Amino acid sequence: MTESNHSPEFGPSAAELAEIEQELPLIEAEVLLLDAQITILCADPSPSDLDWQRVRRARKRVLREARALLAARATSERAA
């Protein structure tokens, strides 16, 4: 088995860790969106306007972070 096979004895490579770190803002934004969506589903008796506003803000953040990640990747690919 080689080091790139994600074996527990080797762990992720430095490049893989760097990629995860670069994706972290998007992952965090997606978690916040999921949390807001769960709040809507569990609202009793019904979701408030603030609950819906939270979902909209979270969606916008996910899109903003996804665009930023794509732009960063495009820039790094051009530089390579």
Image: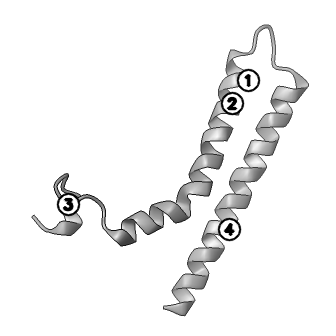
Residue bearing the label numbered 1: 40
Secondary structure found at label 1: helix
Q: Which residue does the numbered mark 4 point to in the structure image?
A: 68
Q: Which mark is residue 37?
A: 2
Residue at left 62%, top 45%? 30
Asked if the residues shown at circle 1 and circle 4 are in contact, with their CB atoms under 8 angstroms apart, the answer is no
Q: Horizontal and vertical percent for residue 11?
A: 25, 58
Tell me the kind of residue under disc 3: Phe
Query: In 3D space, how far apart are the residues under numbered discs 2 and 3 (Cα atoms)?
Result: 37 Å
- Sequence-wise first label, 1 or 3: 3
Q: Residues within 10 Å of mark 2 (few under 14, many from 20)?
A: some
* Secondary structure type for disc 4: helix
| Label disc, if present, on residue 10 of the rendered structure | 3
Q: Is residue 50 left or right of residue 41?
A: right
How far is disc 1 from disc 4 in space, using C-alphas? 27 Å
Which of the colour schemes (rainbow, by chain, secondary structure, one colour) is used?
one colour
Amino acid type of disc 2? Answer: Gln
Badge 2 element: helix
Q: Residue placed at 20% from the left, 62% from the top?
A: 5
